[in-house]
Image: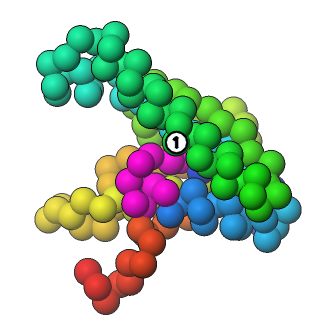
Amino acid sequence: MSFQQILVAVDDSPAGLAAARAAVDLAADLGATVRAITVLRDHVLTGAIGGEPANTERRLAAGGRSLLAWVVDLASARGVSCDTVEQDGDPFRRILDEADAWDADLIVMGRSDRRGPSSPYLGSETAHVLEFTDRPVLVVPRAGERARDR
């Protein structure tokens, strides 16, 4: 199996940032291309904080663009071609849609840092992508995390 188009789903969590680093490192080793996607949930933050929708969404979008710029810089430093996609909506659906549209060979995602009794190792978005994709998925823990530390 050859990985030439690597889609990495990024957010600002430690595991999301580790996923970006892993995707870029893998692409550098394989001579592959990276596409970074970040998904902003429609109105979730606005509803949670009760803020002005336009201002909150503008700030959230600016944070997403900053995160994607960081991934592009990371890739550029390794000589890896990287483009970006910013989406709104349900993260796992947008990730799967982008993987299909771009014909990704591999999806790279961070493992959730959240721990809970029903899903101690995977976040719900990662679990949904694993459940519904027909593509290989690399799940990356946060930097420095080892299995015996959990």
Q: Is residue 111 left or right of residue 35?
A: left
Q: Which residue is mark 1?
A: 67
Residue drawn at (38%, 83%) of the image = 146
Q: Is residue 88 left or right of residue 121?
A: right
Amino acid residing under circle 1: Leu
Q: Is residue 101 visible?
A: yes
Q: Secondary structure at mark 1?
A: helix
Residue drawn at (46%, 55%) of the image = 16
The percent coordinates of residue 35 (x first, y second) are: 68, 44
Instruction: Determine which quarter of the picture holds residue 46.
Output: top left
Q: How many other residues sit within 10 Å of disc 1, few (<14), some (14-19) or many (≥20)?
A: some
- What number of labels is visible? 1
Decide: is 89 above or below 36. above
Q: Which residues are magenta?
A: 9-17
The percent coordinates of residue 143 (x first, y second) are: 45, 72
Q: Is residue 26 left or right of residue 120?
A: right
Q: Is residue 16 magenta?
A: yes
Residue drawn at (38%, 24%) of the image = 59
The percent coordinates of residue 94 (x first, y second) are: 51, 33
Q: Is residue 56 left or right of residue 51?
A: right
Decide: is 59 above or below 95. above
The percent coordinates of residue 122 (x first, y second) are: 34, 61
Q: Residue furthest right?
A: 31
Q: Is residue 148 magenta?
A: no
Question: Which of 125/25 is in front?
Answer: 25
Q: Is residue 94 visible?
A: no
Question: Which of 62/5 is in front?
Answer: 62
Where's the N terminus, which quadrant?
A: bottom right
Where's the C terminus, which quadrant?
A: bottom left
Residue drawn at (50%, 48%) of the image = 10
Instruction: Determine which quarter of the picture holds residue 111.
Output: bottom left
Decide: is 35 above or below 122. above
